[in-house]
Image (tube, grey):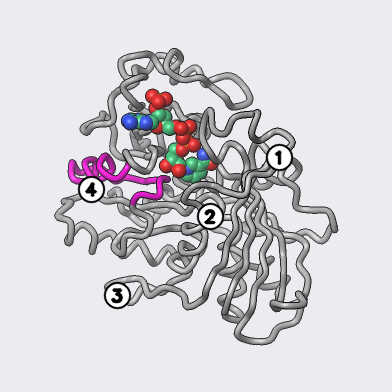
Amino acid sequence: MSRKYRVGILGATGTVGQRFVQLLENHPQFEITALAASDRSAGKPYAQACAWKLAGAMPAYVKEIIVEAIAPPLDCDLVFSSLPTGVARETEEAFARAGFPVISNSSAYRMDEDVPLLIPEINQEHLALIEIQQRRRGFGKGFIITNPNCAVVSFAPPLAALDRRFGVESVFVTTLQAISGAGYPGVSSFDITDNVLPYIAGEEPKVETEAQKILGRFTGEAIEKADFTVSAQCFRVDVLDGHTASVRVKLRKSSTLEDVFAAMETFPSLKLHSSPKSFIDVCDEPSRPQPRLDRDNGEGMTITVGRVFPDNIFDYRFVALSHNTVRGAAGAAILNAELLIDKGFFK
Ligand code: NAP
């Protein structure tokens, strides 16, 4: 058994930070050696600084770790970042400059042209940007990679499956996003109970642009973005975890419903530790997917698709669901880090 990589978590006390702590307990390749958060938490044991909100007890192994400030260096080999975007921009660069690989959840660097925006099953060749980024930014051995917005990750995989087989021309998506997507304490219960909020600050531009980069082609020097348009409306709904996307898609080549099903169902998963057995599960029960019933599919790493039908205006429509703090955040970042190990980036 090779040694475990020592990881630090920036934003460790937050909604995504807690998910990192939960998912990294007993991980065969990583062990947590540093936890960092705001001045409010720094200097306190994690058990005191963090208001644990996940089901089950806080893992014992982190309780006594003293939370540090979010400044390099930390006692670790790489950092996972789940900082608010405003803080992330400066902090993630500082860590990369100090020689740390930064595996980020935040949107701060997602669309920078020399930063990979990864879904390992779809675009691992984008890792080639790391060398370009290090050269351009003078980062030495540090670098930044990112995972997508938690709503985008629900529909980018089925789109990738369709794009490879038929070409995607345009997409109309409505997202129904869970409360935990806003972090803790998030929206007030008074606002969200018995309600649907038709505005999530800053969300629609992300949902309209990230998939084109994820499905883009690495040309040797940059990502040539995929040539389709996305029109998005994003809603916050009274669901705790699990983002749903209602999608209509126009394709470049004609296809049968059976081909559309097959393209999604056969999209391969990987063999990394956190890879689900099935990357995209297509169900044909008419009332699925549902957040409460399907978000934990593949331990939160599978994308569940249903309601796949021909559409009267576009070519096809479907509903896609993913777990926003697992496949949409901490689980995605951990999978990215496992990919880096697999590709020899930490040798
Ligand atoms: P959160 O629950 O509000 O947690 C924020 C974390 O950042 C806490 O650990 C907090 O520390 C720390 N923090 C806040 N302000 C800070 C500052 N000025 N300096 C240092 N640390 C600071 O938020 P979250 O939902 O975990 O989201 C974290 C990031 O992940 C965001 O960029 C978000 O967009 C992204 N993301 C979230 C989700 C999701 O489903 N929630 C999904 C994908 C991506 P204290 O506890 O000490 O205040």
Q: Tell which of 24 and 245 is nearer to you.
A: 245
Which residue is the site of mark 4? 142
Which image quarter is the N terminus in?
A: top left
Give the mark toward the camera: 1 or 2: 1
For this view, does 42 lie left or right of residue 55?
A: left
Which residue is the site of mark 2? 271
Q: Is residue 268 above or below residue 50?
A: below
Q: Could you give the CA–CA distance between mark 4 and mark 1, rounded to whole angstroms?
A: 44 Å
Residue appearing at x 47%, y 54% in the figure = 148
Residue appearing at x 29%, y 45% in the figure = 89
* Amino acid type indicated by mark 1: Asn
Residue appearing at x 40%, y 45% in the figure = 106
Q: Is residue 89 magenta?
A: yes
Is label 2 within 8 A of ligand 1 (CB to nearest ligand atom)?
Answer: no
Q: Which residues are magenta?
A: 88-108
Categorize mark 3 by other alpha carbons within 10 Å: few (<14), some (14-19), many (20+). Answer: few
Disc 1 element: loop
Q: Could you give the CA–CA distance between mark 4 and mark 3, rounded to whole angstroms?
A: 21 Å
> Which of the two discs, 1 and 2, labels the residue nearer the N terminus?
1
Give the mark toward the camera: 4 or 2: 4
Q: Is residue 158 above or below residue 146?
A: below
Residue 213, numbered circle = none
Disc 4 element: loop
Which residue is the site of mark 1? 195
> Which of the two discs, 3 and 1, labels the residue nearer the N terminus?
1
> Which of the two discs, 4 and 2, labels the residue nearer the N terminus?
4
